Amino acid sequence: MKLTRFLLTISLLLPAATAVHAQTSVRDSLETILYKGADDDKTRFNNAYSFLYGCGAPAEEIETLCLTILCPFVREAFEDDDKSMHIRESIAYMAIAFAHRERGSDDADERNEKERFYMDLALEEALLSGNDIQCAMSYNYSAYVEIKRGDVTKAHEYLYASMPYWDRAGMYVKSSEMLYTIASNFFEMKDAEGLARVLEQMREYLKKDSSKQSLYQYNSIKHHYFGLLEEQSVRRDGHVDYALVDSAMVYINANIDLVENSLPELAKNYVHGYAHYFLAKELDAWYPEQNARIFEALDRAQQITEIDLEKKRVSLSIRALLEEAAEAAAAEPETDEPTVVYEAGPADSN
């Protein structure tokens, strides 16, 4: 692997020599940060990383600058501190991987392979450093590379491998997040047995991870688990088992309770408008006569979504279901049948 890096550096120096003019401003700025600043070496490296990450230069240029300037600086500045050197080399390779992911080749396969190659190097350096956070992050990002490539088995290996490092750092919420990602993949594959296994692991982590977001994620996966069982029930018996529907409702309403009472404690990068949306969807599927309740849930979902980062995504889903519910309401006569209101229940203790 060391020979690979040496050859990479040599091959990248050659095109760099013929494109000096194009790289001058970014290169000069990087060298100024690293070699002419008054800060200590760690601060210089951090500033250089932030500069490269935010400068918007093409991925190939970031790759060249990291391999020919940033990495040599790291090896020189931290030659007496192997741990610090390996941590920062790992971060530098991550910077290259991210650059290829965000603005690399137009050829998706080439872009993905570049990202994977440098994430492999980042992971190798992280493991040499022995730093728990850097190891966990490297396994985490490597997993998402594999998910994108379609190798879910390998991705799950990486996600599980990251968890002991998160745990040692006391970041149990991150381990819960890894399990949530694994469970989400099993849901996408319609694998109820795999989902059940991960749910048990998630439930165990809730004993040491008291975050509201982890509980929200557990409830969400539990609801989807019962959704898969509903689908199996319909295929097997020709009709749904309403005990499964009621179980799904328990966890949907548990998340609605979290959203309504603990929203500031939930992660900002999740679409919490889905809590009410899934209530509307479940009612629409199994209790379509409850139009008032469906519209009420959809309206609240839209209100909650206004403060979520991915509101466009959930709004599209809401709009589609809203149109379906409106059509159903127009087609059905009015009824005096009372609306059933489901109470939020706690996460199960089994």
Image: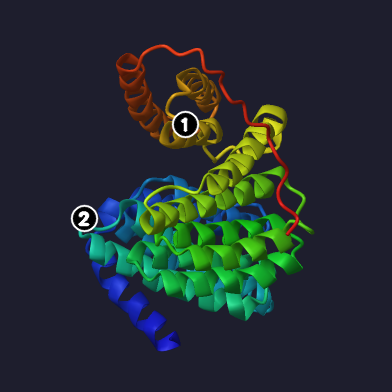
Q: CA distance from mark 2 to mark 1?
A: 47 Å
Give me the disc on residue 68: none
Q: Nearer the viewer, mark 2 or mark 1?
A: 1
User: Where is residue 281 drawn, in percent x and y?
Assistant: 45, 34
Q: Secondary structure at mark 2?
A: loop
Tell me: 339 left or right of 314: right
Could you say where residue 243 lies in the image, as x and y percent from the top left?
A: 57, 47
Whether residue 237 is situated above or below residue 335 in the rendered picture: below
Q: In this rendering, would 77 be left or right of 149?
A: right
Across and down, in percent, residue 91 comes to: 54, 64
Q: Amino acid at mark 2?
A: Asp
Q: Residues within 10 Å of mark 1 (few under 14, many from 20)?
A: some
Q: Residue at x 31, y 64 (%)?
A: 112
Horizontal and vertical percent for residue 140? Answer: 54, 64
Q: Nearer the viewer, residue 295 or 304?
A: 295
Image quadrant in which you'd find residue 55: top left
Q: Which residue is mark 1?
A: 287
Residue 77 visible somewhere in the drawing? no
Instruction: Tell me if label 2 and label 1 are in contact, CB under 8 Å.
Output: no
Residue displayed at 36% across by 62% down: 148
Quarter of the picture holding the N terminus: bottom left
Amino acid tagged 1: Tyr
Sequence order check, earlier mark of 2 and 1: 2
Is 257 situated above or below 97? above
Q: Residue at x 53, y 63 (%)?
A: 195
Helix, strand or loop under label 1 = loop
In terms of depth relative to the viewer, which is nearer, 123 or 312?
A: 312
Q: Residue at x 42, y 28 (%)?
A: 288
Mark 2 — residue? 106
60 relative position to 30: left or right:
left
